[in-house]
Structures are given as C-alpha cells and as structure tokens.
Amino acid sequence: MLDPTIRYTAAQPSDAPAIADLLEPYAEMGVVLPRPAGEIGEHIGNFLVAREVGEVLGAVALRDFGDGLHEVRSLVVDSGCVGRGVGSQLIKAAVDLAIARAARSVFTLTLRPGLFQRAGFELVDMERFPQKVWSDCAQCRKRHCCDEVALLLSLEP
Ligand SMILES: CC(C)(COP(=O)(O)OP(=O)(O)OC[C@H]1O[C@@H](n2cnc3c(N)ncnc32)[C@H](O)[C@@H]1OP(=O)(O)O)[C@@H](O)C(=O)NCCC(=O)NCCS
C-alpha cells in the first residue's frame, strides 16, 4: 500500500547534502558508489527524491549513456524507512523519467535484483554494458570481485 504522505519529485539543488548523507554509509560498505555532495549538485537534474514533510527519505539517479541507454543508479532509502515500498517507488519514478527522456532501455547493476525484477527488469549479462564498466566500475574497489548483477528494462514496444 502506497504511503500518500511520501512524494516522489525531482531533486532540488538544496537536496544534494541530504542525498550525500543517505549514500555515505552504504558507500562505505561498498553497496553503492561514493558520490560527494558537490558531484551530486552538479548532476542534480538527474536525481529524484522521496520526500516526507520536507525531509528527504530516499533518492535515485538516472544517467544517460547515449543511444537511448540510461542507467538507474545511486538508489538509496533511509535505513529508518526501508520495507515501506519507497525503493520500489523510486525505481518506478526513475523509469518514468527515462521514458520522459525518450530512453529505449534502462539498466542497473545491483545487489538487490528482486526489487528491479518486480519493476519489470530482466537479468542480463553485465558485459552488455561496457560503457559502465569503463567508467564507474574501473574506479570501484570491488572491480576484481564484483558481486552485483545486471538487469535491463526494454522500453521499446
Ligand atoms: C535497497 C533499498 C533501496 C530498498 O529500499 P526499500 O524502500 O526498502 O525498498 P522496498 O520497500 O520497495 O522493498 C524492500 C522490500 O520490502 C518489500 N516491500 C515492497 N513494498 C512494500 C510495502 N509497501 N510494504 C512492505 N514491504 C514492501 C519488498 O518485497 C522488498 O523485499 P526484497 O527487496 O527483499 O524482495 C534500501 O534497502 C537501501 O537503500 N539499501 C542500501 C543501498 C542499496 O542497497 N541500494 C541499492 C543498490 S542498487
């Protein structure tokens, strides 16, 4: 059941520190890539947030890899409100943004495939996304022992 008090909206520049705070503990655990507030601010137009009474409860970003391929990344929900469907709604909001940006497909690399499979994503071979591997994965401390899986959602009819 959706919580009507939580709104899913485009992030504002002033949200960058709150998004960075949400990501930081999970970046330290190696669950998401680290993203400092300055970098988030530079790309704030790609972020969506879950907001309740003005407070940022969760965030997600969309990255355009060109040629109609977008990535859902930096998905995070405040540890105090996991299991309420916020993560799933953020994935849905990111897919809606991808559609609005005329994406042809959306991929993600994740440790939580079930969340994305429920949103219609399908497991695929990570080698389908060399652009991602060349950029982010090359800097990841788990690049030689990656435990993530790749999923793809085709938006083409
Ligand atoms: C992964 C993460 C984003 C999930 O956020 P969330 O808000 O708990 O996600 P949801 O509530 O939509 O789903 C979580 C679980 O609750 C269940 N759930 C979904 N909607 C629900 C609802 N309305 N009520 C109760 N439970 C629900 C789902 O079955 C899901 O279980 P599963 O993923 O084990 O299959 C969050 O735990 C997080 O920030 N983790 C750390 C960072 C991270 O792992 N990011 C993802 C990297 S891609």
Image: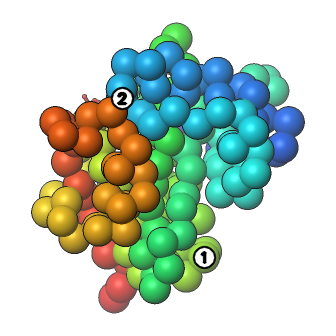
Label drawn at residue 92: none
User: Who comes first in sequence, dot 1 or dot 2?
Assistant: 2
For label 2, being within 8 Å of ligand 1 is answered yes
Query: Disc 1 or disc 2, which is closer to the eye?
Result: 2
Image point 40% across, 44% down: which residue?
A: 139
Image point 37% across, 68% down: which residue?
A: 131
Pointer 1 and pointer 2: residues touching (CB < 8 Å)? no
The kind of secondary structure element at disc 1 is loop
The location of residue 79, given as percent across then percent down, is: 49, 15
Image point 56% across, 50% down: which residue?
A: 61
The location of residue 122, given as percent across then percent down, is: 20, 61
- From the image, tell me which residue sits under label 2: 31
- From the image, tell me which residue sits under label 1: 101
Look at the picture and state if 117 lies above or below 148: below
* Amino acid of disc 1: Arg
The location of residue 13, given as percent across then percent down, is: 84, 43
Q: In which quadrant will I find the C terminus?
A: bottom left
Q: Is residue 54 visible?
A: yes
Q: How is the image coloured?
A: rainbow
Count of number-bearing discs? 2
Image point 50% across, 79% down: which residue?
A: 66
